Image (cartoon, helix red, strand yellow):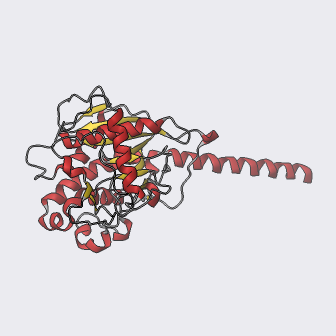
Amino acid sequence: MGRISFFFLVLLFVAFTAAIYNTARFIAASDSTLGGGEEEFDFNPGGKKKLFHTVVTSSSGSYARWQCRIMYYWFKKFKDQPGSEMGGFTRILHSGAPDDLMDEIPTFVADPLPSGLDKGYIVLHRPWAFVQWLRNATIEEDYIFMAEPDHLITKPLPNLASRLRPAAFPFFYITPEKYEREVGKFFKGPVQAVDPVGNSPAIIHKAQLLRIAPTWHNLSIQMKQDPETDKAFGWVLEMYAYAIASAVHGVKHTLRKDFMIQPPWDTSLGDKYIIHYTYGCDYTLEGVLTYGKVGEWRFDKRSFTAGAPPRNLTLPPANVPGSVAMLVKMINQATADIPNWKAGE
């Protein structure tokens, strides 16, 4: 009798363990539980790749066009290399009409916001563009990588996110606690629940973004129409809207400082995955940074708002940090290889 009881207990233990495992898998797989809890189950049977779909939003102007062409060039360079979990690519064009890059870059055409609603703040179109794409496009991958035209991918990018926690870059200028009053108008939870992130760069599970995107869009509009909030958040209002929308849905991000660098402040690439060239790079011929003053040597994407930069940009002086030199070399390589590249277009 004792032997039978022993084996019975063993079988009961095995069955109980299997039940816990299957329950955990069910919880992890359920879209309704894709929040930001501390516990998470990120099963990846057999080490199968967790592919993500890379997305950039863009207007139809020359300034965005040339950046998108260079960004897509480097995406293709690293997509199929070892260590990459990069899947498909989409440029969301929020002009409402196709353009002549449709055959070069996979593109989804989204409708713009009603005229005048953006109040001259073009980034306000981004959340609405994402809402339309998520609702109407066929997206095979389970994860979404939200990138920007001025991102240069520097090496194969793995999926840095899990099912329950997106991965995002922490921005020093996104400080929810500094704006507790403004945040409190749109989120009634603790301000500490709002991460110091924007929507890009970020890798997020598709089910999470499907829930967040409409809230992100609505909050962006509401915040822009609130004079106090609009003044407080300024040009990063849409980034705050994404961060607050994520908090509304209980989503917390894993903060990845290794996601990208931003020259000239970050002087070396290190182990980072992206160069974000949003800041101007101005130097003397001796390699001294003259930020805020036009340098004897400079690279600033805003110098090319009316059209694409020429091929073979002049390299920076010898003493300029390696991150800046790499940025210019990567742009030169892309423009040399991209067919029909024409300065000023």
Residue 296 left/right relative to 263: left
Task: Choose top left, top right, bottom left or bottom right for residue 105.
Answer: top left
Q: Residue furthest left?
A: 116
Q: Is residue 140 above or below residue 223?
A: above
| Residue 297 x %, y % | 27, 57
Task: Choose top left, top right, bottom left or bottom right for residue 177.
Answer: bottom left
Which residue is at the front of the view, 223 or 295?
295
Q: Residue furthest top?
A: 103
Residue 147 can be seen in this image: no
Residue 143 can be seen in this image: yes
| Residue 129 x %, y % | 24, 42
Residue at image location 20% in from the left, 61% down from the top: 294
Residue 309 left/right relative to 14: left
Q: Is residue 66 above or below residue 266?
A: above
| Residue 344 x %, y % | 18, 38
Q: Is residue 316 above or below residue 125?
A: below
Quarter of the picture containing the C terminus is: top left
Which residue is at the front of the view, 250 or 5?
250
Task: Choose top left, top right, bottom left or bottom right for residue 262.
Answer: bottom left
Count of numbered circles in the view = 0
Which residue is at the front of the view, 110 or 225?
110
| Residue 38 x %, y % | 51, 62
